[in-house]
Amino acid sequence: MREHPTERPTSSDSIPWDAGLRLIRFRNQTGTALLLLPTCWALVLAERGFPSPRLLMIFIAGSFLMRSAGVVLNDLADQSFDRRVARTTTRPLASGELTRRQAFVILAILLLPAAGLLWLLNPLTLWLSPIALALAALYPFSKRVLHIPQAMLGLAFGWGTIMAWAAARGTLEPTAWTVFAATIAWAIAYDTIYAIQDLEDDRRIGVKSSALFFGSSLWLAVGLMLGVMLVLLLAAGLQTGIGWPYFLMLGAVSVFFAMQTGTLRGVVTPPQAFRMFQAHVWVGLAIFVGLIAGFLA
């Protein structure tokens, strides 16, 4: 495999912004959507209907900024690993297009407006925010310790639901934690599918992932996590007294989940795994639509 320098010599500290945009995965916002959508679920459930446009815009902007910051933190932590994985060897830090100093500058540019957004929210949400940053920072290192680091990703993505509920209600209620738990189960499922892309490289370099841990039982583990997610979302609907369209949508989603689980019983190629992962954005949107319809019914 081609060797890459740690940092490419430059005549100045100016940031090549094309590389900066690739660092934050600007052209691929699947991760932003998967972070945002559960917060939208929480907002709808907390407000018993379409969420406040003000809160919605704050969480859309916050999701973009925090997901972008999260992938910068991930690439800073995984720079040496990324050079040894075929899929990630061209990432700007791994290839030397960006220096670590430049990556930290980009991280600061993202975190400053994210912090500014917090001052538009109530005190409880502000107090909860450091946990979100801590979880985002811990996730990259969990791949060195945990056999299912996807659970840490779920905690990081799920914490947005807690902050959204707190922003809408000024307090935390049992339904908030139900949606939080559902998001964790969902993230374990879809990120296990995502990890299929790097199975052989992860095995070779010693990175832990749920796809490696579950092995031949991967389909069963993913199916179980998706089932847990559905049960928890069903419970959240019952807790809030939502109407029948929501439960109908959960039924449709369950059929899609069964189809994906069946596909995982066979051989899944890396490109196919990525497409299956991306399809979960549509799942999140379907649940969001079901929630809105349920409160309108």
Image (cartoon, helix red, strand yellow):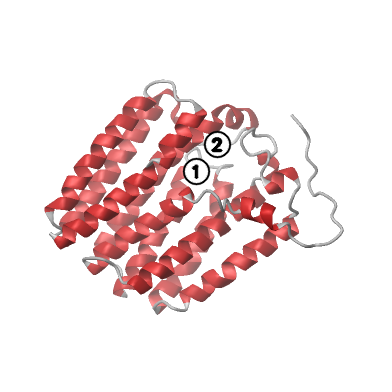
* On screen, residue 125 above or below 273: below
* On screen, residue 229 above or below 289: above
**Which mark, residue 208?**
2
Farthest residue in the top direction?
266
Q: Amino acid at mark 1?
A: Pro
* On screen, residue 122 above or below 186: below
Q: Does dot 1 land on a helix, a strand or a loop?
A: loop
* Residue 139 horizontal/vertical position (percent): 53, 50
Residue 185 in view of the camera: no
Mark 2, Cα crowd under 10 Å, few <14 / some 14-19 / many 20+, is many
Q: Amino acid at mark 2?
A: Lys
Q: Does dot 2 land on a helix, a strand or a loop?
A: loop
**Which mark, residue 149?**
1
Circles 1 and 2: CB distance less than 8 Å?
yes
Residue 175 in view of the camera: yes
**Which mark, residue 27?**
none
* Residue 287 horizontal/vertical position (percent): 27, 51
- Closer to the chain start, of discs 1 and 2, is 1
2 left or right of 159 in image? right
Q: What's the residue at 58%, 48% (across, down)?
A: 141
44 left or right of 271 in image? left
* Residue 258 horizontal/vertical position (percent): 28, 32
* On screen, residue 267 above or below 165: above
